[in-house]
């Protein structure tokens, strides 16, 4: 299978550089490119009609490249019931029992954050209140989350993966893609590598992983979901159509609840049906996502495994949520913004970035979306500043005219936090420095004990439920 594509030709006035998104292919020696060219905005997927450096419509001459997709061997390793397994690895008496990792029960709004395989069999689900979970399974062992420990296990997992490949792309705490193409020449040997990874993880960490082996990232991830716990699934370039055709569409990466509903409405229930669709039809039905899903279902995903060092620089940092009940007052809107911005600020500081602008997007109960953006007073990485800028913008743009179903806040116009900071005459540099130190201390506590460990007093009224998977309003009030 050869994926052909075009890149802008070298005649443009711009310097010739290796497009950064192709570096992993060069490294894996799976890429044949006739001439290197200016980085193109639309890569790998057909003609671009403007030069991406200057957006000049006349700079549109192209060179031809090809990518041998079927030569790749990509593994996706996913730890089984990660939080619960780590708890059992640390406390052997929990082994084989129904275990649920839950938020604080004393605060009476604890919810299930993760559960073991056995707990799953009792119908325990993530997001369920502790009371309901206990009723469903009276012998359920409840343990508090320990985020420092999860991060530690995650690092140890990566160290095991690093024995097999230097091309590792983490996906969350407990999942990783590994490109083992440069070490493994025969596709069948991918299974061997996967089995060795499973064995070493079990032996050294006393937890289990499921591994998918395939020729692209999407199928590797799908494979790791097929045999749980502790299984290897191989999806070959020759056999994927037969192997996958009966699977439900939602098993594909990128098909969430709403996409599934949309596909089902058109009578598309399985991956086979999705692959057999006209691409144009899917584009009409789902927009750009339709084209991506069609490519995925037909085994044409050509995304490289990108290591942390090669990941493109962050352009924005955002966080959004759809709470289980609608927001009906401006005070609620501000609190949710403040809650969302805790995460935005922490991530900005992690990336050593500050933002000079903020973007707010709200969706009302009629599903109308309003997006707005504005500059912040000064470059900032402080959660409170970002939330205040977001709320000021929201009010300036009309505020709350009808109940809101969902809300997101995004920090935009990012710059490095090493850039010189222009402070105005009225701001007290000592106070700013103090606040910076406070942010650092809060980040350290959140890293060790989880996102809900430290919160601004104004959102501590138990209005929202915090967990590492997100923020929500309580499902049931107890
Ligand atoms: Mg997992």
Image (tube, helix red, strand yellow):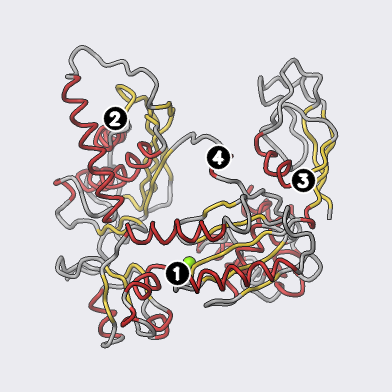
Give me the C-alpha separation between circle 3 and circle 1.
Answer: 33 Å
- Is residue 326 positioned above or below 80 on the image? above
From the image, which quarter does the C terminus lie in?
bottom left
Horizontal and vertical percent for residue 293? 66, 57
Q: Residues within 10 Å of mark 2 (few under 14, many from 20)?
A: few
Give me the C-alpha separation between circle 2 and circle 3.
Answer: 53 Å
Q: Which residue is mark 2?
A: 396
Give the mark, 3 or 1, whose residue is nearer the N terminus. Answer: 3
Horizontal and vertical percent for residue 399? 28, 37
Horizontal and vertical percent for residue 278? 76, 58
Give the mark, 2 or 1, whose residue is nearer the N terminus. Answer: 1
Give me the C-alpha separation between circle 3 and circle 4.
Answer: 18 Å
Can residue 213 be seen here? The reply is yes
Q: Which residue is mark 1?
A: 205
- Say which mark, if any, is on residue 309: 4
Q: Residues within 10 Å of mark 4 (few under 14, many from 20)?
A: few
* Most distant residue in the top direction: 425
Can residue 398 be seen here? The reply is no
SS type, badge 2: helix
Give me the C-alpha separation between circle 4 and circle 1.
Answer: 26 Å
Give the mark, 4 or 1, whose residue is nearer the N terminus. Answer: 1
């Amino acid at each position: 299978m050869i994926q052909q594509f075009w890149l802008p030709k070298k005649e443009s006035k711009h310097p010739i550089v290796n497009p950064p998104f192709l570096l992993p292919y060069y490294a894996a020696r799976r890429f044949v490119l006739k001439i290197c060219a200016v980085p193109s905005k639309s890569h790998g997927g057909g003609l671009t009609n403007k030069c991406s450096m200057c957006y000049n419509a006349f700079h549109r001459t192209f060179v031809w490249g090809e990518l041998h997709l079927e030569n790749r061997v990509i593994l996706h390793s996913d730890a089984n019931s990660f939080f619960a397994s780590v708890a059992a690895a640390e406390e052997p008496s929990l082994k084989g029992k129904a275990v649920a990792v839950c938020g604080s029960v004393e605060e009476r709004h604890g919810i299930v954050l993760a559960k073991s395989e056995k707990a799953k069999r009792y119908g325990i689900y993530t997001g369920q209140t502790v009371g309901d979970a206990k009723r469903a399974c009276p012998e359920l062992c409840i343990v508090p989350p320990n985020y420092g420990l999860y991060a530690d296990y995650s690092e140890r997992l990566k160290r095991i993966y690093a024995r097999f490949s230097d091309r590792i792309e983490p996906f969350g705490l407990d999942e990783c893609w590994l490109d083992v193409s440069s070490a493994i020449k025969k596709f069948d040997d991918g299974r061997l590598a996967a089995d060795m990874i499973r064995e070493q993880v079990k032996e050294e960490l006393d937890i289990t992983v499921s591994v998918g082996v395939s020729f692209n990232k999407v199928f590797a991830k799908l494979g790791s979901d097929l045999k749980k716990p502790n299984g290897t699934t191989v999806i070959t370039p020759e056999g994927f159509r037969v192997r996958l055709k009966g699977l439900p569409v939602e098993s594909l990466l990128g098909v969430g609840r709403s996409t599934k509903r949309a596909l089902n409405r058109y009578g598309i229930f399985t991956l086979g049906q999705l692959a057999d669709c006209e691409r144009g039809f899917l584009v009409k039905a789902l927009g750009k996502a339709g084209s991506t899903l069609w490519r995925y279902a037909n085994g044409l995903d050509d995304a490289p495994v990108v290591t942390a060092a090669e990941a493109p620089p962050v352009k924005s940092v955002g966080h959004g949520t759809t709470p289980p009940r609608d927001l009906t007052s401006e005070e609620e809107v501000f609190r949710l913004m403040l809650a969302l911005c805790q995460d935005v600020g922490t991530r900005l500081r992690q990336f050593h970035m500050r933002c000079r602008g903020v973007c707010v997007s709200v969706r009302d109960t009629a599903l109308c979306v309003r997006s707005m953006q504005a500059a912040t007073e000064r470059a900032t990485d402080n959660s409170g500043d970002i939330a205040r800028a977001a709320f000021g913008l929201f009010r300036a743009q009309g505020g709350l005219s009808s109940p809101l179903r969902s809300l997101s806040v995004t920090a935009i116009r990012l710059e490095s936090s090493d850039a010189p900071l222009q402070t105005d005459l009225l701001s007290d540099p000592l106070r700013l420095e103090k606040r910076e130190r406070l942010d650092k201390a809060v980040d350290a506590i959140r890293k060790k004990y989880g996102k809900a460990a430290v919160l601004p007093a104004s959102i501590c009224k138990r209005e929202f439920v915090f967990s590492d998977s997100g923020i929500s309003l309580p499902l049931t009030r107890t």
